[in-house]
Image: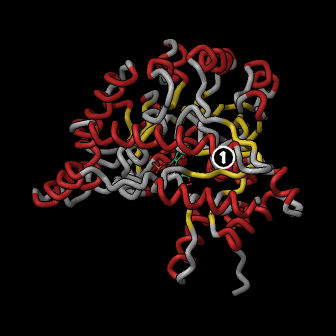
Amino acid sequence: MDLPLSKRVQEVAPSPTLFITAKAKKMKQDGIDVIGLGAGEPDFNTPENIIQAAYKSMENGFTKYTPSTGIPELKKAIVQKLERDQGVRYKEEQIFVGTGAKHVLYSAFQTILNPGDEVIIPVPYWVTYPEQVKLAGGVPVFVEAGFEADFKISPANFEKHITPKTKAIVLNSPNNPTGMCYSKAELKALADIAVKHNLWIVSDEIYEKLYYGNPSDVVSVSSLSPEIYAHTILINGVSKAYSMTGWRIGYAAADENVIRGMGKLADHMTSNPTANAQYAAVEAYNGPQDVPEKMYQAFSERMARFYPQLEEIPGFKPKKPDGAFYFFIDASEAARRKGYESVDAFADALLTEALVAVIPGSGFGMPDYIRLSYATDPELFQEALNRLKDFMN
Ligand code: PMP
Ligand code: GLU
């Protein structure tokens, strides 16, 4: 077929996180004993009470269209959650529920950007932000923060990249792919600059529950001042905190005008997030919180167990994460020692020769790095580390 696809679709890059995860799964199906450390997806089942809530909702007939931006019960549960956990007050009219945080972010960029608008994205970034910005006609502007800076951008460097076309900055703390977490003071310094230049702050807080330091250090950006609150589009969801990646429920909390805009898009795109998944999410927020607590403990134990081993692999230079469930490792020396001209090629060899699937850092804007997800059965993770050690020795 020689009918060309849209320029928009031709220019968008596929998601490397999803691509490599699918490739590893396919290799496994074909009988190859590969260990996937690709996807950032908790290896626990969704808690039983949440599954039961979804069953019950279907038995009670909640199998029909819902309001396009979410059922009132879920908006109420989210409002209560934000007040309980983050100390920030929102009205139900300020909440948009979508089909996963990814769809919510997509809707937010579509709502706030005009063609040519610039969006500041700190590097490394989650693979999806630049593509979503481009799909909304925007232009990603990258601000670098390297290993020595703990992957944290400085306020001065942020401000230097602002132009008359800048419309927003994306903040993601705790961060994917590094696990880095900004302190309250660091976040406020960045957010104050955004307010000074009248920018939107798209704050992706999906790893909020996964911080291994003092919990009071993790704050929502919107809690930092009334002006910052007014400029923030807070993004979160149930995927990571409640091991509900497949249910596809995420949300935004923001200015009512933005939420109405996002709602108009949902009217024509999804009609509503899946009904039973919304009832499941109500239970996630209102029900017992012991399972997320157990998952947090498990991830934090894995981090403590595996990080020292990574430091010992020849050529690997990891950075100790503050949160989330990823190790981000400078593997340029490892690639050089094994004779590969790039870390991309090295990551490919890890998959085909060491049988360990990792995500190359190029997808996150840092091509010298690899990302390993420890949201993986710990014994499998240990076996993967043994394979990496053998490969490098
Ligand atoms: N933001 C970040 C930083 C993520 O890592 C993910 C992982 N998928 C998402 C958003 C999207 O989450 P969801 O499953 O809710 O779409
Ligand atoms: N966010 C997860 C990751 O970074 C899941 C895959 C995706 O949605 O990109 O691996």
Mark 1 residue CB less than 8 A from any atom of ligand 2? no
As drawn, 238 above or below 147: below
Say which residue appears at 77% left-offset and 21% top-offset.
159
- How far across and down, in percent of the image, does residue 160 sit? 82, 23
| Residue 143 shows up from this direction | no
* Quadrant where the image shows the N terminus: bottom right
Q: Is residue 330 left or right of residue 277?
A: right
Q: Mark 1 = which residue?
A: 310
Say which residue appears at 75% left-offset and 68% top-offset.
349
Between 96 and 53, which is closer to the camera in this rendering? 53
| Residue 268 shows up from this direction | yes
Three-letter amino acid code at disc 1?
A: Leu
- How far across and down, in percent of the image, does residue 274 sit? 31, 57
Task: Name the secondary structure under disc 1.
Answer: helix
Say which residue appears at 49% left-offset and 31% top-offset.
211
> What is the quadrant of residue 282 in the picture?
top left
Circle 1 crowding by C-alpha within 10 Å: few under 14, some 14–19, many from 20? many
Instruction: Spot the residue most to the bottom.
Output: 1
Say which residue appears at 39% left-offset and 58% top-offset.
246
- How far across and down, in percent of the image, does residue 113 sit? 63, 40
As drawn, 127 above or below 346: above
Between 106 and 294, which is closer to the camera in this rendering? 294
